[in-house]
Image: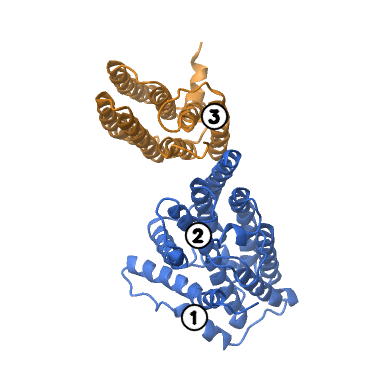
Amino acid sequence: MMNEVNLLTVTAAVFAIMMSGSGQSRTNLLLYAMQTFFIALACLAQAEAKGSPELYTVVIGIIVIKVLTVPYFLSWLANKIEARSDPGAFLPIPLTMHVSILLFALSHFLALGLPLFKGIGSVASDATGAISLLLTGMLFMLTRRFALGQIIGFLTLENGIFLFAVTQTKGMPFIIEMGILLDVLVAVMIGGLFVFRIQKSFEHIDVTQLNGLKE
Amino acid sequence: MILTSANLVFIVTLTIMPFLLIGVIKKIKACFQNRVGPPVFQSLYNLVKLFNKDEILSKDCSWIFRSGPLISFSGMLLLCLSVPWLPLQPPVPGCDIFLFVYVLALIRFFSIISSIDAGSPFSSFAASREATLSFLAEPAFVLALVALGISAHSSDLALIFGQPIENNRIPLSVWFFSGLALFLSGIVELSRMPIDDPSTHLELTMVHEAMVIENSGPNLALVEWSYALKLLLFFGLIAQCFVYSLSKIIALPPLLLPLSVLVVMLALGCLTAMIESFSVKLSWGKNPDFIAYAVSMSLLSSLAAFAMNGGS
């Protein structure tokens, strides 16, 4: 039973792990786009298995907004404010990758302990991928120095939640799925605007130094 | 050692393939630079030329300097005859994972002390770099092989690799991630491009090439030959990892297996040449970041091995 692994979700989680190992903003965004693309493919497989036409629209929405628009916008932003390479905070970046592999193992055991939805395909490995994406996104947010890294970490976390929702339920209402997608787009735009303003006011986007702001 | 047809294939490929691989890599790199490039078997001609040359020794050298290349060549030859780098049973049976790793470490130890023995500051500097790199890359290499061993329930390399497809029970993800980990750590061990530039002796890039800078004549020939054998050994194991993971998706006829491994080895040579043409050498401080990816791949592979082992 354990040999049944959904390669798409696990590949998305592996791309997230590889993303957390690089400090280059553009590499991070490229790997984020790959990871989201595999999530879109997993969603497509779900759409075929469940036979729901709404999920196909969601797949198209993911590819247009999260695979193409958001990484393109963020890499434009990274170029604009010259935040090309993140030095990392609290934990060296290669070690972050190894810790996120440990979190992947942890999420495997967590997923085995969950009362899982008895649905299509290999639900346990889908849950593993989703929880691992969530934890990797959180770790990514914690260990990055630049505010741009916080946005990418947040997006990875959101990918994890979305994947969990798609694979572990019988399907959410269409309007909610599309609403979340729109929320993500708006959040990225506002986050990008904030990063831009922070850069303009302080001439850096180092979040560890923002602690000194409180009076 | 009995001369069966499998052994014959093994030995014939052993004599031709290392030089072919090096030649293919050089030829493709030359194509990318708009040069004609040396003939494919140029490294073989170089070998013959070097064996006919005189040897110049520094007056401060001891027997260690002379014996280093001999030990590395004989060790590599032993490994090439006992490690199944083609999916056939090797001529000398019974090579363990740990024997493989420790013979490689022994060879590295002797090449390091023989380059220090020559007394040149260049080669001792390169020797210290080589020691650092191998210290960083070895965990990835060992862990990838051990992950395969866990899935195969054996540490005998001939039971892991070199098996017919039917009784191969290592899962796809373990093969694939181990292949990636072996390829990335192979780049480090073979001192290829993002880590070390094999085509220059410049101060910035000197690891392997500067280590052997004092060797000349037959001694240099042995060093180059053992490097070619090491390339063959690594590429063979990596190619098998990828061919086996492919065979989990597409059914390959068993007779085609050795042939497809040879093709994948040449493809890996092309890939290496392309990486060397398009990438820049990493600065020395960035090397651990690169090696971290190799370690991650082998960690993922051992994780997959543990997770899949529980269920099957």
- Near mark 1 (Cα within 10 A), the count class, few <14, some 14-19 or many ≥20, is some
Of all chains, the one bearing label 3 is: A
**Residue occupying the point 53% across, 71% down:** B228
Indicate the colour of chain B: blue
Between residue B297 and residue B260, name the one nearer to us. Answer: B260
- Residue B147 lies, in percent from the top left, at 60, 48
To which residue does mark 1 refer? Answer: B44
How far apart are the alpha carbons under marks 3 and 2? Answer: 31 Å
How packed mark 3 is, by other alpha carbons closer than 10 Å (few <14, some 14-19, many 20 or more), is: many
Query: Looking at the picture, which amino acid does disc 1 mark?
Result: Leu
Residue at point 59%, 72% (across, down)? B226
Residue A28 numbered tag: none
Residue B203 percent across, percent down from the top left:
54, 63
Q: Residues within 10 Å of mark 2 (few under 14, many from 20)?
A: many
Residue A68 seen by the camera: yes
Q: Which chain is orange?
A: A
Residue designated by label 2:
B240
Q: Nearer the viewer, residue B284 or A15?
A: A15
Residue A89 % position (x, y)? 54, 31
**Nearer mark to the viewer, of 3 and 1:** 3
Rounded to the nearest whole Å, what is the CA distance between mark 2 and mark 1? Answer: 25 Å
